[in-house]
Structures are given as C-alpha cells and as structure tokens.
Amino acid sequence: MAGGGQVVLRTLSQQGWVRGSGAAVLSRLQDAAVVRPGFLSAAEEETLSRELEPELRRRRYEYDHWDAAIHGFRETEKSRWSEASRAILRRVQAAAFGPGQTLLSSVHVLDLEPQGYIKPHVDSIKFCGSTIAGLSLLSPSVMRLVHTQEPGEWLELLLEPGSLYILRGSARYDFSHEILRDEESFFGERRIPRGRRISVICRSLPEGMGPGEPGQLPPACAPGPL
C-alpha cells in the first residue's frame, strides 16, 4: 500500500501539497503532477458551484460506472458557461496547457458524494490528450498516483477546495490515479475528511482528433478522469 517506506515531501512551491515515495519519483513528476493551491478565490469557487448546482441536482448519484472506475457519482459535460465562469476557465487554460494544445470543447464536471470515490485507473489516449487540469470544489481530497510497473513508486496530491491540479504525460500514462474514499483519506499522518466534492476538468484534444469531433466522446475521459 502506498504510504509505507521512505517518504519525501516536495520542496519549494509544492511543499505541503505533494508527497511521494522518494526523491526519484518526485523529480520525475515535478512538472507532470502539479498542485496549485488557492487557484480560485472563495468568490470564484462560489461562482462555479452556483452555476453547476442546478444541472447536477437534476441527476441522480450512480454506483455502476460503465467501466466500474467511479462509485457514488454524477457527471455532466458542459460547454456553455457564464462569462464569469469562462474567465476562470481561461485562467485554467493559460496555467495548464501549452500554446499548441487544443482543448476539448466541453468541460467534464464530476460530482462525488461524501462516500464516493474513484478507483485506480490509467487514462486512455483515445479519449484525452496529454494534459488534464481539474479544479476542486467543496471538499478536500487526496489523489494517489501509483506506477503501473513499480507499485513502490507513488505520489499523493492534497487537493483542497479552490486548488488546481494538472496531470501531464508520464503522470497520466505510466501511473494510475485515484481519489481516496473517506475512510482511507489521509495525507501522511493527517486525516483529510471527505465531503461532497465537485471537480471541473479541462482536457486537451486527443492526438489526431479534429476540433469538431469531441462530441463523439463518452461522458468521461476513459476509463474515468478526475
């Protein structure tokens, strides 16, 4: 289980929000798994939550995701936003994506109930490009990444409300990632109680897919993005 053995906390800008199994994995994923705490102001978080709530309220929580990756969730794809929310999403694009990257036209919104969680999975290159970036709303949570070939190599990200996380390249394809269920939600020795969590996820276009094609994608970035 991740969390054993030597633990190294990342220094500088990531200190306090990223921890890993050793210096090598921290160095390897320094630019591939990034947390930016306080990316949203309280007012911006409220703006997004208020806009999303009516759409989410019309949906029921589900417990049988199509590939069994998510438990206790509801989700939607959203392409029409208020101007205030579009301004926030433009900041996400500027912070997380390169000038040559095209984003999927719709934004994935995932609502986890307090007892909901996301199981370890590796994203498919068929449905998402090399970068995803997610805003965390309402509740703190812990994201765990584990190397698919070397399970002793792991990284954990503390995602507080208002934070932005970015996963690129190796962090998405060589490592599984998950959101820990409430009873497992610890960051080191620190208990991170889980409540309802909404994530707003922007994704780059899969390689070779034209801008007019994103509507052909399933509702989630298979097998299930965060």
Image (spheres, grey):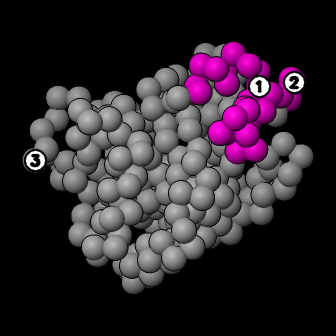
Give the left or right position of residue 172, taking residue 54 as reference. Answer: right
Assess whether residue 187 is covered by the magenta stretch: no
Q: Is residue 71 above or below residue 175?
A: below
- In the rendered image, residue 53, in percent from the top left (x then y), is placed at 44, 80
- Label 3, label 1: how far apart the Cα atoms are: 42 Å
Q: The residue tagged with tag 2: helix, strand or loop?
A: loop
The residue wearing badge 3 is 212
For the record, the magenta segment spans 4-30
* Residue at x-position 49% and y-position 57%: 135
Give the left or right position of residue 144, taking residue 176 as reference. Answer: right
Task: Give the number of the disc on residue 5.
Answer: 2
Q: The residue tagged with tag 1: helix, strand or loop?
A: loop
* Residue at x-position 32% and y-position 35%: 98
* Residue at x-position 71% and y-position 63%: 194
Q: Amino acid at mark 3?
A: Gly
The residue wearing badge 1 is 21
